[in-house]
Amino acid sequence: MNRVNASFLVVERWLVSAALFFSLVSLSALVVCCFYQIVSRSIFHLPLAWSEALVRVLMLWSVFLALPAAFREGAMISIDFLPQKLGANRAIVVIPLAGLSLFLLLVLVIYGTDILGRVRFQKISGLGVSMVWAYLAIPIGAGISALAVLAGMLRAVTDRRLSRDEGVAA
Amino acid sequence: MMLGSMLIGMLLLLAIGVPVAVAIGLSAVGPLLIFSDTPPLLIVQQYFVALDSFPLVAIPLFILAGNIMQVGGIAERMLALAKAFVGHLPGGLAATCVLTCLIFSAVSGSSVATAYAIGGILIPAMVKSGYPAGFAAALQATSAELAVILPPSISLILFGISTNTSIGDLFIAGIGPGLLIAAALMLSVVLYSFLRGYKGENAREPIIPALRQGIAALMMPVIILGGIYSGIFTPTEAAVVAVAYALVISLFFYRTLKISALWSILRTTALSTAFIMFTIASAGLFSYLLEQTGGAQVIASWMRDNFDHAWTFLLAVNLLLLVVGTFAETAVSILVMAPLLTPVAVAMGIDPVHFGLIMVINLALGMITPPVAVNLFAVCSVARIKLQELIPYLLPMMAVMIVCLMIVSYVPAISVGFLGIMK
């Protein structure tokens, strides 16, 4: 594997882990916030105006930041009857399937970035901050997921090359 | 053109093995970019709108609560409790499997999670006691379906959100059918075991200590349903209370959970949530386009014209959903089909809550019918057997499920009857 590819894989692994870390932080914050909402209303009789909005934004971030790891670790469930028949680890099977995922993710990155300009002046009701802070999760999560899928394709190709080299050596 | 390419595209992409969420997303995005003049920014907007919902937050929270319970060793306690009750019957361990799934279903909303959690313990135990591995796996896969029928079922939450039906009502209505299916399965395995000569467990364990150990876990559904029904909290808030309750009992009451395990529980939860939510977002766009292209209305009006009685309609819906459930993933089937079919059902005088239960039981049946049978894949990987080994044992269990489905379809009192008592 050449140096460019190897460093790409290192960066990709680092980004996916960082995204997952922040996803878990969002998820924990969501639990705390939602719990605080109940306590505040039912014990202190102070209904909160901002908590539901914040919880929704946190869920969006938690979902999109865990997406790269879900793609990377095969948590995205598929019907793998046909790939199994054809040999699930062969590059010729892996690459077209990954290519389709990559396409959808790139669509989300492109239009997800595009939409940021449109929603810039809209406010999230209850929180009073720009909608950009919610929408931003989509292009960032989809972008890192795209890198993860690309890395998977790269690994499939280099693995095949490795096994072919071994075949020659034998 | 657009409608056709969406539906055919989805089936094709699913068949070649594209991840479910991606297949649905692409089958909407592709036709939208090619055939329609809808602005593409709508894609991102629909992905956002589909997830920007407070009731939906109940899903990751219930998954989290289930995961905490599972790591906290709650499954073993439920198993001990079930065994104390039915372990001595003929086929005691098999009956225990059904009862444990029934109890675990009250804290878990996902049947795959239940299949892994209970199957991981019970399938090896059953094989060790001399049951065929195929029988153990088939029974586990079938019993695990209870998790999507009994509250807190993720499928029922999805149905509630996509059709604006009260999630609390759906939860209550799930109790009757869940108990019916559990009883029918239990009766069948005991009868079957009696005929085949499978013995019960020798030493009968005392019930009281097992009950004392299991009672904290059994309180969970009481808290969830009681809280929602008395109006103290919404389903989402009930879910966070479930998380807090699961944490408290496994950290302080059972003391089986270490704080250090929390991070990996969160990790598992985030990964399965990412999958489900990305699927929901893709299905959101898909349903939106189906509505926009008029496809939804075409299907609905065709149904209205061709079925003039509620009972023929229900029969047709059952057949349709059995086919759909065989091929499609449950969350997707609900998100796409429920908004289409429910208005037609309501127009025919069927209670939407009753209809929701019919849909969910149907799709649960789909989870054990190949080729797309998530429960079967789960138990096969736990039992380390091939799919064909469990099929002969599976068929009679499916027959039991189908009979129960028919009873639930034509006797509304089993599902919505409980509502009348509660209200």
Image (tube, coloured by chain):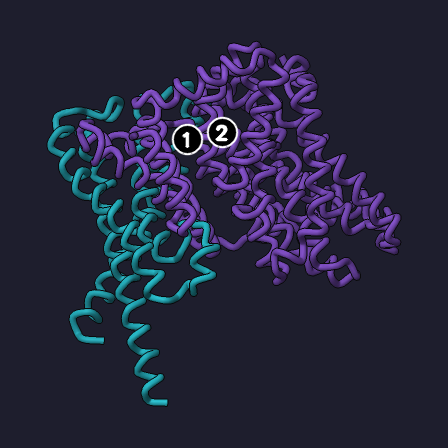
Give coordinates of residue A145: x percent, y percent. 27, 51
Q: In the rendered image, which quarter is residue B152 located in?
A: top right
Amino acid residing under circle 1 = Leu
Mark 2, residues whose alpha carbon is within 10 Å: few (<14), some, or many (≥20)?
many
Q: Residues within 10 Å of mark 1 (few under 14, many from 20)?
A: many
Chain letter tied to cyan: A
Q: Amino acid at mark 2?
A: Ile
**Is residue B170 at least partly visible in the picture?**
yes
Please tell me whether residue B98 is drawn above or below residue B378 in the rendered image: above
**Mark 2 or mark 1, which is nearer the start of the sequence?**
1
Identified at 80% across, 46% down, the residue is: B84
User: Image point 37% across, 43% down: which residue?
Assistant: B21
Determine the chain carrying the residue at label 1: B
Q: Position of residue B311 (x, y in %)?
A: 63, 17
Q: Secondary structure at mark 2?
A: helix
Q: Which mark is residue B157?
A: 2
For residue B225, say whether it is visible.
no
Quadrant of residue B148 in the image? top right
Chain B display color: purple
Residue B372, image x, y percentages? 52, 46
Q: Residue at x 59, y 30 (%)?
A: B319
Residues at badges 1 and 2 in contact (C-beta under 8 Å)?
A: yes
With A155 as the anchor, is A40 left or right in this view? Answer: right
Name the residue nearer the viewer: B235 or A114: A114
Residue at (44% x, 46% y) in the render: B272
* Residue that carries the numbered disc 1 in the rendered image: B56
